[in-house]
């Protein structure tokens, strides 16, 4: 067996390092593409050798790193992490293809950062030690900060700083929680360890209910801010909007907040001092984010900003489904992460293409673009339809699972969230109609359609949205296996 | 007869200093550059000897000198700084008439610091402290034509002299109450000190004396001016080296000798630590001179290290000691990087010549001096505590120890401070990489490159493979408990 988990971090990292030293645009993009394809190959290898009938950690490796503090370099892959690794590994090669033809300053850094980002995100998904987890978690900040700050829009400085400081502070609060967990366990057992699974398993024995609540809340705060969820989302619209297209897509692939929820917070949830209160709080925040994001998206003038807020709304489903604490609602939340990554990639790529060819993203200034950009119109339509939850596409499956099964435990919040379905359909269709259809505004002159590389890359992602929409089982099965394991913990405690 | 081999590192450093001073007199300015290499070689030899002697424990000269894990660790810190500084100074002293004086002062300062680390007696401690201080006073004012430099050196000297006097005054009180200057003896007679109100006065005086060298607020007034005014290599020595001398002396004096008065000085250090880290970070945000910004960030870092006195658990002391070495690489390297930029500005005669380390002069440094910009980025991210660097590991151990000891509030303050610091560090990175360069690319002289790479290697070694350093720091902390 290949040490896949480590290679998935190392391969993109090595390619990134070499990419930084390339001279021309083609060299940089080509090398980065090669690196991402190698990563995709490794991911497929992991997928093919993966046993989705068990929730046990597979491809597990562990080496001592700082024995004094019980820090180990431990990595592994299970049904929670594999779909997200798959999402990253699939989208990034096409993201590179999509961006290939664009002219920009220092392409070597641009593509190098994309691969660094990939390594960091996969690093978070595979790490099973809190220190390793935190290291990669923080590492994701740096490529995104540079991405927005160098190649972003007009207000890039503001957006990048806001993003950096905001999420860094959230991570530090999370770190406090991790330390709390670490020391409480050390005191209890006399053996220092940062092993995620051990600490999560020991959580129920640690300290008072109040202490456990504090630890749980400070850790989940880091995840909610990264997800993001109302009211910790204020960095999101700025960062998503100001980032270059590739940067926005990378933000979308940054599914570490939701991942942390499944890997760490949900198994801890039943053992907090007051689980009912926590579930109510999370359910409310989830449902409210769904509604709030949709409402705010409805009144956006800027296409990219609208997509950013719709993303906030969609992330609400992840939280709501998690708080639902039923096997299928949790699986739905996991599937939403996967589906959202694919759908939003298409949406941001569309918005980017529109901006490149017309120079504007203000929805009202556009119109009739479908005549001049038919290929884009088709692909964009599919993305927007998936976003509003059209059956047959991935978005539907995720939202259906979350709404239908969270109802078991959280009926009130589901009803609240249901309101958003109409609004979501509203803003998606309305934006589509105003931007792509209607009278073509002649002031744009001769607008060109997206180039063949872009059609190809967006097309493949669109096909995946369709494929997984019709046949979600390849990823859904492993999610269900792991959700069962998570939920059975809660069920055993009667939560 | 004592086994002088135990003092081999000190002897090598002292001998190198004397040899350089002696042969430098007979050399022409053109050939003097070789002295820099000689100094580097001497420091390197002492460094190797120190690492070799890890694990040895002995007392010498009637118990006035103690060779233990604590002193060995700090010797490592001082020699690492001296190494970086002496390598970088090879460029700084190019074509200087006073090369031999410069290097011998650096070496004597290092010697003083090393002896402070081993001092087990107040008298020796004070003498060594003064040896290091006087050497650095002279170094701070080394650019005699530079008004800013002279002002900084003057401030440093005046405040240093007063603080020495206060320290000596404090020592006299301790002697008066206990009848001895030996640190172990004082600890034995601690009850005499604890019962006597004089003990409290002594604590106050000693905190003022050491607080000056540690640059804790409000004893920090000299630091920003001196760090900014001094040649960058000297700022590096001051911030990375002589500040740590303050810490090792304070460790021995407060934790070992004055353990009986712990409640008193612990309260004082709590206030000093919190005020220092917050003040340093808040003021650093508004600085436009990079060296000044680094000076204020250095205050903040001293505030973090001072947490070790507040938390006082083995873990916290390990963290504090580990932090001193981590800080030596980060801050030492950052000042050298600033020095390389100052060198570029003054030789190219472009940009703001009045304040050669002005933030504007760092515009587009990624294009003009790629290596300096890259290393500087590593140093400031390390200072901010970004993972995989020494700074992260140090904060990790130190801050988490506060949580372990139940002082979550202190950890929260420190962590918030550390988040705030990211703001001004990230701004520097933005200037270096995102703003267009003013001027053309310039080749980096070898000594600067070598010093920067040494410091970067230290930052990553401690970040990626912290185990041996933590192990040493833990051994050193055991001496204090």
Image: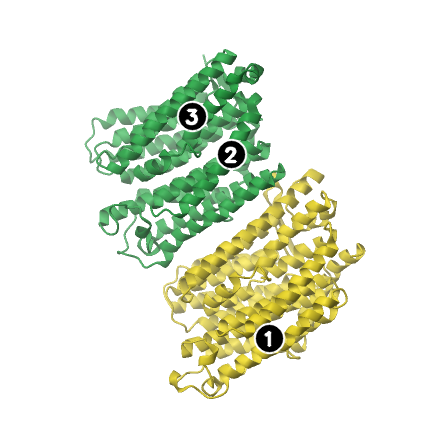
Determine the CA span between mark 2 and mark 1: 54 Å
Residue that carries the numbered disc 1 in the rendered image: A387
Q: Residue A377: where, in percent of width, then height? A: 51, 83
What residue is disc 3 on?
A: B209
Q: Quadrant of residue B449?
A: top left
Q: Tell me the subunit letter for badge 3.
A: B
Within 10 Å of the Cα at label 3, are there few (<14), some (14-19), or many (20+) other Cα atoms? many
Residue at figure coordinates x 67%, y 42% from the top left: A184
Q: Are marks 1 and 3 in contact (CB under 8 Å)?
A: no
State the image coordinates of residue B304 (x, y, percent, origin top left).
Answer: 50, 38
Q: Colour of chain B?
A: green
Calculate the distance from the C-alpha at mark 2 to the C-alpha at mark 3.
16 Å
Q: Tell me: B181 left or right of A189.
A: left
Quadrant of the rendering where the N terminus of chain A is positioned: bottom right
User: Does dot 3 land on a helix, a strand or a loop?
Assistant: helix
Can residue A19 be seen by looking at this rendering?
no
Q: Nearer the viewer, mark 2 or mark 1?
A: 2
Which chain is assigned yellow?
A: A
Near-viewer residue (B54 or A310): A310
- Closer to the observer: label 2 or label 3? 2
Please tell me whether residue A444 is drawn above or below residue A255 in the rendered image.
Answer: below
Give how far apart the Cα atoms at labels 1 and 3 are: 66 Å
Q: Position of residue B354 (x, y in %)?
A: 25, 45
Mark 1 crowdedness (10 Å alpha carbons): few <14, some 14-19, many ≥20 = many
Same chain? Circles 1 and 3: no
The label on residue B271 is: 2
């Amino acid at each position: 067996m290949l040490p896949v988990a480590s290679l998935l971090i190392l391969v993109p990292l090595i390619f990134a390092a070499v990419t930084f030293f390339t001279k021309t645009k083609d060299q940089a993009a080509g090398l980065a593409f090669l690196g991402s394809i190698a990563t995709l190959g490794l991911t497929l290898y992991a997928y093919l050798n993966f046993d989705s009938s068990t929730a046990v950690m597979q491809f597990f490796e562990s080496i001592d790193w700082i024995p004094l503090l019980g820090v180990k370099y431990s990595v592994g892959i299970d049904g929670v992490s594999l779909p997200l690794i798959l999402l990253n590994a699939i989208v990034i090669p096409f993201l590179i293809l999509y961006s290939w033809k664009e002219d920009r300053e220092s392409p070597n850094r641009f593509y190098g950062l994309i691969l660094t980002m990939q390594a960091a995100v996969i690093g978070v998904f595979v790490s099973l030690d809190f220190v390793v987890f935190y290291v990669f978690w923080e590492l994701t900040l740096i490529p995104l900060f540079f991405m927005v700050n160098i190649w972003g829009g007009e207000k890039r400085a503001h957006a990048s700083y806001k993003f950096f400081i905001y999420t860094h502070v959230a991570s530090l609060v999370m770190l406090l929680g991790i330390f709390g967990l670490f020391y409480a366990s050390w005191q209890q057992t006399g053996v220092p360890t940062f092993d995620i699974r051990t600490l999560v398993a020991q959580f129920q024995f640690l300290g008072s209910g109040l202490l456990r609540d504090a630890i749980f809340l400070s850790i989940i705060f880091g995840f909610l801010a990264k997800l993001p969820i109302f009211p910790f989302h204020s960095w999101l619209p700025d960062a998503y909007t100001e980032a270059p297209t590739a940067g926005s897509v990378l933000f979308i692939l940054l599914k570490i907040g939701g991942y942390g929820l499944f890997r760490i917070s949900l198994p801890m949830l039943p053992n907090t001092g007051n689980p009912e209160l926590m579930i109510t709080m999370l359910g409310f925040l989830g449902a409210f984010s769904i509604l709030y994001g949709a409402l705010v998206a409805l009144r956006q003038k800027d296409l990219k900003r609208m997509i950013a807020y719709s993303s906030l709304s969609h992330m609400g489903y992840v939280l709501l489904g998690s708080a639902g604490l039923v096997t299928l609602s949790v699986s739905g939340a996991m599937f939403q992460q996967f589906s959202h990554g694919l759908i939003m990639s298409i949406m941001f790529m569309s918005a980017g293409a529109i901006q490149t060819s017309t120079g504007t993203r203000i929805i009202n200034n556009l119109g009739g673009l479908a005549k001049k950009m038919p290929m884009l119109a088709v692909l964009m339509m599919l993305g927007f339809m998936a976003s509003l939850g059209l059956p047959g596409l991935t978005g539907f499956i995720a939202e259906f699972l979350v709404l239908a099964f969270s109802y078991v435990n959280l009926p009130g919040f589901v009803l609240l969230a249901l309101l958003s379905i109409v609004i979501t359909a509203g803003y998606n269709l309305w934006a589509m109609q105003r931007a792509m259809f209607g009278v073509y505004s002649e002031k744009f002159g001769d607008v060109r359609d997206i180039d063949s590389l872009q059609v190809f890359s967006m097309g493949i992602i669109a096909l995946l949205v369709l494929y997984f929409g019709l046949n979600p089982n390849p990823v859904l099965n492993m999610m269900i296996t792991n959700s069962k394991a998570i939920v059975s913990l809660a069920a055993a405690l009667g939560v | 007869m004592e086994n002088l081999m135990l003092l081999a590192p000190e002897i090598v450093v002292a001998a190198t200093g004397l040899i350089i001073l002696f042969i430098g007199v007979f050399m022409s300015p053109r050939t003097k550059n070789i002295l820099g290499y000689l100094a580097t070689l001497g420091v390197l030899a002492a460094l190797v000897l120190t690492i070799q002697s890890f694990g040895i424990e002995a007392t010498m000269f009637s118990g006035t000198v103690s060779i233990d894990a604590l002193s060995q660790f700090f010797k490592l810190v001082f020699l690492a700084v001296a190494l970086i500084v002496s390598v970088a100074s090879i460029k700084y002293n190019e074509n200087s008439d006073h090369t031999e004086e410069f290097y011998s002062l650096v070496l004597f300062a290092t010697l003083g610091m090393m002896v402070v680390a081993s001092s087990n007696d107040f008298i020796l401690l004070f003498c060594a402290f003064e040896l290091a201080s006087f050497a650095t006073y002279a170094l701070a004012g080394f650019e005699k034509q530079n008004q800013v430099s002279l002002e900084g050196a003057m401030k440093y000297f005046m405040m240093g002299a007063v603080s020495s006097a206060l320290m000596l005054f404090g020592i006299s009180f301790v002697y008066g109450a206990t009848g001895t200057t030996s640190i172990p003896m004082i600890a034995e007679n601690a009850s005499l000190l604890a019962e006597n109100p004089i003990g409290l006065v002594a604590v106050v005086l000693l905190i003022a004396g050491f607080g000056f060298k540690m640059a804790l607020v409000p004893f920090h007034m000299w630091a920003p001016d001196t760090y900014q005014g001094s040649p960058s290599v000297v700022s590096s020595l001051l911030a990375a080296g002589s500040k740590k001398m303050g810490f090792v002396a304070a460790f021995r004096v407060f934790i070992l000798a004055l353990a009986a008065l712990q409640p008193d000085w612990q309260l004082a250090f709590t206030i000093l630590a919190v005020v220092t880290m917050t003040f340093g970070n808040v003021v650093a945000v508004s600085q436009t001179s990079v060296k000044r910004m680094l000076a204020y960030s250095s205050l903040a870092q001293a505030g973090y290290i001072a947490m070790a006195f507040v938390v006082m658990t083995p873990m916290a002391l390990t963290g504090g000691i580990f932090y001193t070495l981590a800080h030596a690489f980060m801050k030492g390297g950052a000042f050298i990087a600033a020095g390389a930029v100052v060198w570029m500005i003054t030789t190219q005669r472009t940009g703001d010549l009045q304040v050669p380390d002005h933030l504007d002069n760092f515009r587009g440094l990624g294009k003009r001096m790629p290596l300096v910009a890259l290393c500087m980025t590593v140093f400031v991210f390390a200072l901010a505590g970004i993972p995989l660097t020494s700074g992260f590991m140090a904060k990790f151990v130190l801050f988490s120890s506060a949580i372990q000891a139940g002082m979550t509030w202190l950890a929260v303050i420190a962590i918030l401070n550390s988040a705030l610091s990211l703001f001004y560090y990230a701004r520097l990175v933005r200037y270096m990489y995102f703003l267009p360069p003013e001027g053309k690319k310039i080749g980096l002289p070898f000594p600067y490159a070598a010093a920067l790479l040494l410091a970067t290697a230290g930052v990553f070694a401690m970040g990626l493979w912290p185990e041996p350093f933590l192990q040493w720091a833990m051994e050193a902390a055991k001496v204090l408990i």
